[in-house]
Amino acid sequence: MKEDIENTSNSSKETRNVFIGAKVTPTQKEQIKSLAAECGMTVSDYLLSCAYNFKPKARLTKEEAALLQNLDDCRSDLVKYTSALHGMSTKQRMAMFNQIPFMVGWLKELGNVAESVCQFLNAIKEKNKIPFTPKAEEE
């Protein structure tokens, strides 16, 4: 079953049932189909998005998916380190946190890394959308 593509038109009851055709070469057709598939979209959805000046995002390659998994593993490690800190006795934490400048910098960097990983993961999960109206051109 095909995955539903989110349509952001004003009327959710309005269906697309009007055909617009364009003549292309066989090579162009294959290129368009390939670009649509890379974005996880149908050719119709892909062309409609492009017509509204929206550049659909390509889905992850196998290599990128492996890198994403590695990032997720890093995020998991950060969670484990946080849990380990919470599991330490007060005396152990006090000894560790005695080096305040180092610890503040370290925790700040860990927070930045965790935030970046979460933003990346959320951006990857977002579906390509079909815009309702063209993007306004910058004036």
Image (cartoon, grey):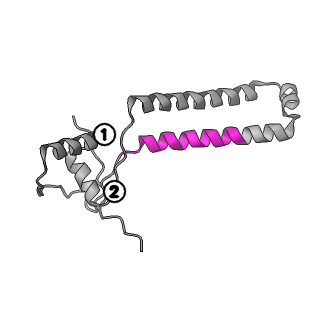
Disc 1 element: helix
- Give the residue pinned by disc 2: 54
* Labels in figure, total: 2
Residue at image mark 1: 38
Stretch in magenta: 109-127
Gap in angstroms between the C-alphas marked 2 and 1: 15 Å
For this rendering, which residue is in front, 94 or 49?
A: 49
Left or right: where does residue 25 sit relative to residue 80? left
Instruction: Tell me which residue sits at (80%, 37%) in the image.
Output: 103
Crowding around mark 1 (Cα neighbors within 10 Å: few <14, some 14 to 19, many 20+) is some
From the top left corner, tell me how far across and down residue 99 is, in percent: 87, 35
Q: Is residue 16 above or below residue 2?
A: below
User: Where is residue 85 shown, x and y percent of the image?
Assistant: 75, 28
Q: Residue 120 placed where, x, y %?
A: 51, 42
Identity of the amino acid at label 1?
Glu
Identify whether 4 is placed above or below 80: below
In the rendered image, which quarter contains the C terminus? bottom left
Residue 88 is marked as none
Residue at the image point whose x is 24% and y is 55% from the top:
48
Q: Please tell me whether the stretch drawn in magenta is mainly helix, strand or loop.
A: helix
